[in-house]
Amino acid sequence: VVTIADVARQAGVSIATVSRVLSPAPDPHPVKPATAERVRAAARDLRFEPSAIARGLVARRTGMLGLVVPDLTDPHYPQIASGVEQAARSADLSVLICNTLGDTALLTDYVRLLRARRVDGMLLSGGSSLTERDLRLAAASGVPLVLIGRPAFDARLPYVSIDNVAAAHAATQHLIDLGRTCIAHLAGPSSQTTMLDRARGYRTALRQRGLMSPVVIDTDGTPEHAYDVLRERLQGEPPDAIFAATDRLAVAALAALHDARVRVPRDVAVIGFDDIPLAALLRPALASVAQPAVELGRAAVHMVVSVAEGRVVEPVVLTAVPVIRASARP
Amino acid sequence: VVTIADVARQAGVSIATVSRVLSPAPDPHPVKPATAERVRAAARDLRFEPSAIARGLVARRTGMLGLVVPDLTDPHYPQIASGVEQAARSADLSVLICNTLGDTALLTDYVRLLRARRVDGMLLSGGSSLTERDLRLAAASGVPLVLIGRPAFDARLPYVSIDNVAAAHAATQHLIDLGRTCIAHLAGPSSQTTMLDRARGYRTALRQRGLMSPVVIDTDGTPEHAYDVLRERLQGEPPDAIFAATDRLAVAALAALHDARVRVPRDVAVIGFDDIPLAALLRPALASVAQPAVELGRAAVHMVVSVAEGRVVEPVVLTAVPVIRASARP
DNA sequence: CTGAAAGCGCTTACAG
DNA sequence: CTGAAAGCGCTTACAG
């Protein structure tokens, strides 16, 4: 590959001059226009592309961010990743993707890796399923860290999240407003704060109403498990509404209800969470709480950049709103 | 951050010795065990992590791969990304993700970026929607390049793909075997070879049968458009089977059929392509052609590494098989 | 077995 | 305005 020395030679100048012409320094160093033009011509000629890694070495910043996701095939994370990627691009940052597959050992490896690669920051999504030890380890790496989704512990880590309690409350409230009297919550694993928050919002909404007692159906978060649990449950008296903690669970619920010959929304209204791209295409179309994925990504990127610059940042909490579709209409 | 010099100082040796102890050279340089131990202790003490970027500078390889995807929120690409990431990790490579959103200008930017970052290779997925010019541009960057999915042109670029023609043929054949006599193809945009290949497999299967004439329903690839087109179509006499070029189109088809009060699979059998994670959870469960995403990723990574090492590689074509579920059962 | 030195490809004071 | 030189953090011949 062609280096700055090649360009310097061809333009008949020193490498310092080449650097000055080609590098957009904040305080632009004066260069004679004619010289600059010669340099630019040579660079163009040689198809010279300055090495970002050599630059990174001297600048002590790489312009790279590490994004840790548990599972890219869970439709929620591509939404996040998409938002992060978009925000990163407009901030001239690149995103290194790390798929932990829920494996703590992999997380450890990735944290080490990102540290070795000297990324400017680390974005940890799905962090609510991690143990406190995992989070401490990630934080102890010294790499600027921002969590996407509320942390499980008060680890004093900056995070960006939606208000899961409020959003779950709103979703449940909608079912109440529909006149439903037995509203169940299809819950995700209680090891995740996100899921606990959603369950809490659900409970709070019911309590304020004072009429019905909460019916929480626990799952491990996978649609398969949710389907089985729900099928079992539907042997008895079904609820007349279900608030699912994620759309994956909601889709499983729609399947279970369908297979049990229970009609949605007539017999049971259903609302999910995440508003995955396919939600609107399901039949009945799935009502769901939409997370502002792009906003989350943007906020996370800005925050981690701030942290990297040594500033103290406050957590950011965005609001998520229910999108009502056929599955939760009168 | 702590550097090799810090470790050397603390261990009372030169940085060369530290490097020899800590760097897994293929031809291990002899170091006195006691010295090595001192170095290791110092490194541990200081929590030293060698800079991958400094290493990269001297090794002239970064251990990074660029993965270009058109759209992460299309469920197909996370499957690919997942496979690539997994394969990359076992090869000790990191993946830089680039989301082009179907924008050629962004592609150009990303190619430049990946070149500047001196990635060891570039994986281009969704390339069948690119113009010949786009591909040439990417190839001309000089970065080792492998396409995921068959290229639109004979650009002599290595690629890994499934056999779309054969897979589409198999899917169509299944519908024929079901005894369906009017099988339509819900096609993706003809600007993508992938889509053309699937249409071709469909046509071939019908032709071999000799009975029915092909019915191709064109779409721009988005489920929204597919839904509209199909609703329109369903005003008239519906086909009795639909082979959709992607699962997103198939999901749109299920919705359109549902809304037109056409029953699946009784009146119309449906089979899609990609086997997205949610396919099995739809009702009726969506039959679909499953792509070996992990294998595709693995093959792509191995190939691009070979290319980077200067070897000539042959294209790899994997087979994809239909997974039959309720939507395409008798 | 160990170290001094050159070099990977850049940027940026420091002189001129 | 331009260049020689130091330095970013490593690895690796080259001497000893």
Image (cartoon, coloured by chain):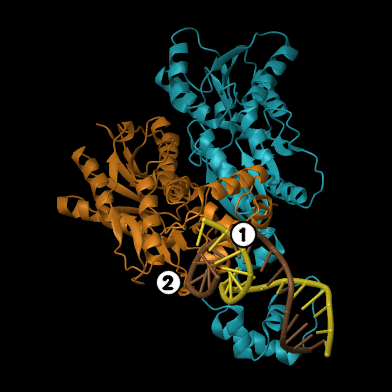
Chain colours: A cyan, B orange, C yellow, D brown
Instruction: Kindly identify which residue carries mark 2.
Output: B132
Helix, strand or loop at disc 1? helix
Closest to the observer, A201 or B35: B35
Q: Is residue A159 above or below residue A182?
A: below
- Residue A44 x/y as whole percent: 59, 83
- Residue A238, placed above or below residue A78: above
The answer to which image quadrant residue B58 occupies is bottom right
Query: Same chain, marks 2 and 1?
Result: yes
Q: Amino acid at mark 2?
A: Glu
- Few, some or many residues within 10 Å of mark 1 (<14, 14–19, 20+): some
What is the chain identity of the residue bearing mark 2? B
For label 1, the residue is B15
In the rendered image, residue B270, in percent from the top left (x then y), is placed at 33, 39
Secondary structure under badge 2?
helix
Q: Which three-letter amino acid code belongs to the residue tagged 1?
A: Ile
Residue at (56, 86) in percent of width and height: A45
**Disc nearer the start of the sequence (2/1):** 1
- What subunit carries mark 1? B
On the rendered structure, is B70 left or right of B159? right
- In this rendering, does residue B104 appear at all? no
